[in-house]
Image: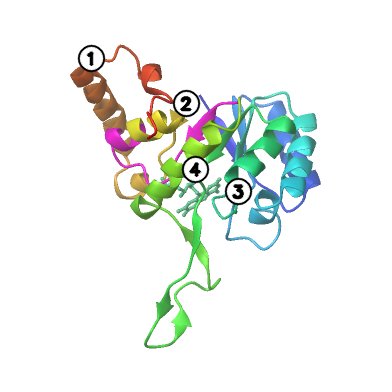
Amino acid sequence: MILANIAGSTPEECAEVAEKLDSTQVHMIELNISCPNVKQGGAAFGTSCAMAEQVVSAVRKATSKPLVVKLSPNVTSITEIAKAVESAGADAVSLINTLLGMRIDIHSRRPVLRNNVGGLSGAAIFPVAVRMVWQTANAVKIPVIGMGGVNSGEDAIELMMAGASAVQVGMAVFTDPYAPVRIVREINDFLDEKQIPAVRDVIGTVQPW
Ligand SMILES: Cc1cc2nc3c(=O)[nH]c(=O)nc-3n(C[C@H](O)[C@H](O)[C@H](O)COP(=O)(O)O)c2cc1C
């Protein structure tokens, strides 16, 4: 299964990339409207319902492939954005992209990143991912793909209990390229231990207080 992650500076540019991929063997398109590291497009699309709807509608018209829209956590209401992209034709949403962060070198008084601010990923953002996946899964009818700090089978199960139908692994692969293989093994170990027949049986099964 090949999922192509795309982005652009304008809705037209995103649509053009999607159209080019339409005639390839790519199975799904994941439209990134959430990158905090670029000045145009990226998070600007993902932090406004109107902009998100506009870019998703343009890409929707340009491709017949299943369209996943990747959401930004740097918003006041993740559910409003999710509902906007659902109504614009997204087949699924994926979340979360990186949280906007900043570090300063206190000796030079310079921001560590040349862009001054940048995307924070990894274990630190996992609780935010769980919360946003849970809120989003309760707000939309389309499937939710969860990510953000996943580094174990137990993390993946937790995101699925929050409502994710599938899970992506990002940062963990930088330190361990085999992390996804280990995580799948750990998911299966959990299912065996709890005598759960299939992984789909854990999706959305959290019992909120
Ligand atoms: C170095 C780096 C590059 C990234 N590039 C992209 C990208 O091109 N498109 C995208 O949708 N997300 C991108 N992301 C975001 C990740 O896919 C993911 O949403 C985020 O890092 C949270 O998951 P993680 O903690 O498992 O990495 C990038 C993240 C990092 C750290």
Name the amino acid type tagged 2: Ser
Residue at mark 1 to residue at mark 2: CA–CA distance: 19 Å
Q: Amino acid at mark 3?
A: Ser
Sequence-first disc among 3 and 1: 3
Which mark is first along the chain, 3 or 2?
3
Q: Earlier in the sequence, mark 4 or mark 1?
A: 4
Question: Residue 11, labelled with which disc?
Answer: none
* Mark identifier at residue 165: 2
Question: Residue at left 31%, top 42%?
Answer: 151
Instruction: Identify the residue shown where x is 75% and y is 43%.
Output: 55
Secondary structure under tag 2 reads loop
- Residue 203 visible in the picture: yes
Residue placed most toward the observer, 174 or 169: 169
Q: What residue would you read off at disc 3?
A: 77
Residue 195 marker? 1
Report x, y in % for residue 90.
67, 31
Label placed on residue 132: 4
Between marks 3 and 1 in the image, the one whose residue lies nearer the viewer? 3
| Percent x, y of residue 98 | 49, 53
Q: Which is nearer the eye, 169 or 164?
A: 164
What separation in Å lies between label 3 and label 1 (alpha carbons)?
37 Å
Instruction: State left or right for residue 21 relative to residue 125.
Output: right
| Of the two numbered discs 2 and 3 in the rendering, the one whose residue sits closer to the viewer | 3
Could you tell me which residue is drawn at 55 percent across and 36 percent down?
136
Write down the region rendered in magenta. Answer: 142-156
- Residue 77 painted magenta: no
